[in-house]
Amino acid sequence: MDSVSSSTPFLPEIRPGGGDTSDSHSDSATAILVLSTVVAVAGSYVFGSAVGFSSPAQPGIVDDLGLTVAEYSLFGSILTIGAMVGALVSGKIADLLGRKGAMGLAELFTVVGWLAIAFSKNAWWLDIGRVLTGFGIGVLSYAVPVYIAEITPKDLRGGFTAANQLLICCGTSMTYLVGNIISWRLLALTGIIPCLVQLVGLFFIPESPRWLAKIGRWDGSKASLVCLRGKNANILNEAAEIRDHTRTPEQAKDFGLVDLFQRKYAHSLIVGVGLMALQQFGGVNAIAYYASAIFSSAGFSYKVGTTAMAILQIPMTILGTLLIDKSGRRPLLLVSAAGTCLGCFSIGLSFLLQDFKLWDFSPFLALGGVLIFKGSFALGMGAIPWVIMSEIFPIHAKGLAGSLVNLVNWFGSWIVTYSFNFVAQWSSAGTFFVFASVCGLTMVFITKLVPETNGRTLEEIQVSIIS
């Protein structure tokens, strides 16, 4: 739809018979809103399957291609290198191509990456495929939660955006389960299926109304809102609020990285960057990428352990998705961080008891610790930092800020996933005690700095947090 002048007002939707829609409500989940969210979170499933691939694939790849510990550590962690590049440009891509365009481009890279892994004959092709897949999920990790946050009403936004983490968990869990049954090459090929689902689905869903408003397509933004909220819904207030808090392209074009570090954005940046850094240095991807090795080192069957982990995290993520709009963000984050702290401490204690041969059942303590960690993480720390990231930045700053926050997340992931095998060889117990300490620090950070964003529109949140 063509752009119109920035002075063109949003008008009420006029229905046959002369009545407007001001008496109806726009806070219900329409079929197109649900479809749009389902298509978007297909990208989250892709994210999860890529993260979960290295754990069940490790024994097969090492045996077939003869990789050393260092070579496999590079393969496991190089996904995050590609993701960092994707994260760095994700905001710019999403601003230039739109949220749908960013997701589509990301999936093209991911499909090529999976094909390179599936047909690789040496470590080089494995690494190339892993980097390409990483680039795709780096873009998706920004575009998916931002798109969902921008299309959903305030009373549904938390749960719908948290579906991002639910599908990440589903992707990881299914990859763990299926990877215990099929070969690693076939497992890589199955990773292409959700990519194709999203690529096709993007043709049937509307673009974000807030992005359309950002580029000056006011009529397009209004049409998208009508599509998402339903023809009988009152979109007047929401459309006016979007308009009032959206800069025109002329106003936003000069906003640069230096502008992002103005004092008024400091609180938003500290919260966004801090949550992402603490999420990663709490050890989540060390456990996700190397679960098989952790269970084996603890003396527990890795197939039983990864299966139990895969089964647990899906219902816990569903519980978190159901609670996020009822309990609020902060209480769930605090409970989740406390659980991850307990889980890491239990794993560390298991390795410590094993080192001193003090308890024959220490492998079960390691299993319990991993399950407590994964269940607690799925409840809040997995989803809510991404939800908050998508809420706290104004539309004109969201591209740059989102790229920075996303980059910090993936950089932290790379540090942890690359160094974990080497640090664990020095002291497995010490490694997990450090993770537990970070999780404890997370609780303090949440208490002191993280705002409650539940039940407020994106525009209301941004006004309250940006001084």
Image (cartoon, rainbow, N blue to C red):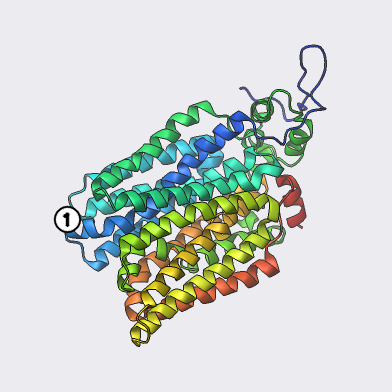
Looking at the rendering, which quadrant does residue 31 occupy? Answer: top right
Residue 14 drawn at (x, y percent): 77, 18
In this picture, is 184 found above or below 32? Answer: below
- Give me the residue at 21% from left, 44% from top: 119
In this picture, is 46 found above or below 299? Answer: above
Residue 69 drawn at (x, y percent): 25, 67
In this picture, is 46 found above or below 1? Answer: below
Viewer-side residue, 239 vs 343: 343
User: Quarter holding the C terminus?
Assistant: bottom right
- Give me the residue at 55% from left, 32% from top: 35
Dot 1: within a 10 Å radius of its alpha carbon, few (fewer than 14), some, or many (20 or more) residues? few
The residue beneath circle 1 is: 64
Q: What element does badge 1 sit on?
A: helix
Q: Amino acid at mark 1?
A: Asp
Residue 312 drawn at (x, y percent): 46, 57
Q: Is residue 365 left or right of residue 72?
A: right
- Give me the residue at 59% from left, 55% from top: 384
The answer to whether residue 196 of the structure is visible from this angle is yes
Q: Is residue 118 left or right of residue 198?
A: left
Q: Residue furthest top?
A: 17
Viewer-side residue, 135 vs 72: 72
The answer to whether residue 399 of the structure is visible from this angle is no
Residue 187 drawn at (x, y percent): 29, 46
Q: Is residue 116 left or right of residue 433?
A: left
Looking at the rendering, which quadrant does residue 20 occupy? Answer: top right
Q: Is residue 66 left or right of residue 392?
A: left
User: Quarter holding the N terminus?
Assistant: top right
Viewer-side residue, 219 vs 154: 154
